[in-house]
Amino acid sequence: MALSDLTISLLLAVLPICAIIFGLYSTLRQWHGSNNRDIPYPPGPPAGSFLGSASILPKSKPWLTYAEWGRTYGDIVDLNIYGQHTIVLNAVEDAVELLEHRAALYSDRPEDPLIKLTGWDFSIELMPYGEHWRAHRKLFQHCFRSKASAAYRAIQSAKVNDLLYSLLTRPGEFRAHCKQTASAIMMATLYDNDLKPETTAYFTGLVDQGIEKAEINPNTVVTFLKTFSILRHLPTWFPGAGFKRSATEVKRFADQMRDAPIDYVGKGLIKGTLGPSLVSDLLENCYVQKEFDMVKRLATSSCVGGIDTVASSLASFFLSMALFPAVQKQAQQELDRVIGMDRLPNFDDRPALPYLEAVYRELMRWAPVFPLNTPHVSVEDDIYKGFFIPKGSSIVANIWSMTRNEERYPEPDVFNPDRFLNAQGELNDDEKVLTFGFGRRICPGRYMASSTIWLAMASVLATFDIGKKTDENGEEIPIDVDYGDVINSRPGTFECSISPRRGNSGKLIREATHTPTS
Ligand code: HEM
């Protein structure tokens, strides 16, 4: 056996024992240091083996197991992993109370030693609560709050028109078009209104690679490293410190996706070849390195948070329309009635289309992009509904349970926009899109995301019919699709038919994209 293998085996043998000792120590320390010794933790699954709750952590789709535990133990579930508490919230009311009404206590993020090691400390989403995060969040809201997001409408409209043209000419590649639309909108908004398609593709490739390299199973490596954060100080050549070597590799890609587009903008500004853009506007007002770094972090966080998420929702939209044709028809009838048949929809039409708005809300409920919210961390001990929530707990809102709550949403797997309408066909007050998260950490890009998804839905429904494909006998081919196990949830590969709705659909699209009519 090579020396390094021996060392790794020893480490693997010793670490679980250290884990137990550390777990016992942290529990005792929390218990001793607390005035709340008689108050119970929320109920949760019993520790499975000598490895503690870690051995019963779900291997896949944890939101399903957490929902099951919610039915067994109650809406608030505690997982104690080596003395580190994760509190799963299965009900909206509890998430709103803790993450919104008590936001001052529950807006931190898990401290993860890998974040800095991998170069992902640029991410606003991963920043600990405090002045550094607050300054970035302020800048983000300045750029992406509801009113500011209206400035990007022209780009959104142009790219959605490109989506229509792509669907007209290459309908079979609709999944690629969804991703292309989401990334073209984000890249053009951030870096250059006139960004060339090949440059968009290059920057998007860097983001994809950066994310792919960083993907690790949060249930294992991170939990372990969090407990044994001392490991982060090992030199990269240390036997068994392979995770550190791969962290260096992840960092290389993270740095590249963060720096390359900014270099492009910088050079464009100097040469005077750049179209207008959010980043160039911001850079022109940067006077010190600190401000320059903030702009970089804002731009990279937007790409990481705002491309795949929007692309996932667009893919789920095509799926839902193929599976629920009656909904599609009703939305198309509303569009025809309100905007007529001789033009494409635009943002000003949104308030006049309540059924389509209900389709949007139902899409975000039926296929939540994040079945589990990003964990928030508590900064003080707290007591809630008679349970003790120790400082440093990770609070995970189980969006899946909330959006599949049968009392609130009967037959939750059915795509039914009527849930969001009253008897008069007006929108009801169930307007909170749960998959955007909660409180002070709620997604700041939600206005931009909502308008991109809405305009794409409206424009596609106005010009295309989406349905199941048929076989050689004209029989519909059933669609059987799985959403997989990734945290950013998206439908697996599926096929559907996408055909122009009317004789003038092609003409409207070509006029909108200034493409010659053929
Ligand atoms: C369908 C699209 C999207 C979904 C479902 C989504 C969802 C989320 C969720 C769940 C969070 C964490 C919320 C929490 O901790 O409570 C988040 C945070 C964030 N999102 Fe989004 N997002 C989307 C689109 C976007 C877009 C378009 C952008 C950029 C323009 C963006 C930028 C961010 C940023 C920067 C954060 C970190 C906020 C913080 O920690 O303070 N997201 N998003």
Image (spheres, rainbow, N blue to C red):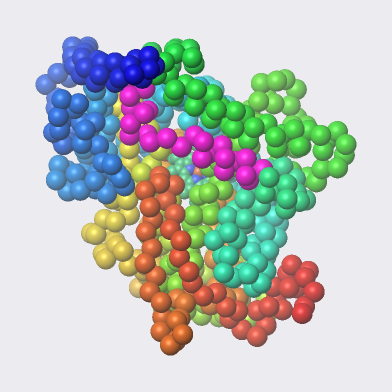
At 48% from the left and 57% from the top, the residue drawn is: 313
For residue 95, side relative to residue 44 (left or right): right
Q: Is residue 422 visible?
A: no
Image quarter hosting the C terminus: bottom right
**Magenta residues, dominant SS class:** helix
- Please state if 309 lies on the left or on the right of 403 as rendered: right
In the displayed structure, 228 sits above or below 410; it is above
On the image, which quarter does residue 161 sit in?
bottom right
x then y, percent, for residue 494:
45, 65
**Image quadrant assignment for residue 122:** top right
Where residue 445 appears, as percent x and y from the top left, is 55, 45
Q: Quadrant of residue 366?
A: bottom left
Q: What is the span of residues highlighted in magenta in the rendered image?
A: 203-229
Residue farthest left in this picture: 38
Viewer-side residue, 21 vs 157: 21
Q: Is residue 214 magenta?
A: yes
In the rendering, at what x and y percent does residue 88 appear?
27, 38
Residue 162, how many percent across, how many down? 68, 63
Residue name at image x 70 percent, y 37 percent: 261
Q: Residue at x 56, y 37 (%)?
A: 210
Q: Is residue 17 above or below residue 327?
A: above
Residue 5 inside the magenta-drawn segment: no
Q: Is residue 330 above or below residue 123?
A: below
75 vs 66, nearest the viewer: 66
Q: Is residue 3 visible?
A: yes
Measured along the vertical axis of the image, is residue 165 above or below residue 291? below
Question: Residue placed farthest to the bottom in the image?
Answer: 473
Query: Which residue occupies the extreme right position in the image?
Result: 271
Residue at the spot x=63%, y=45% of the render?
204
The answer to whether 20 appears left or right of 343 in the picture is: left
Quadrant for the N terminus in the image: top left
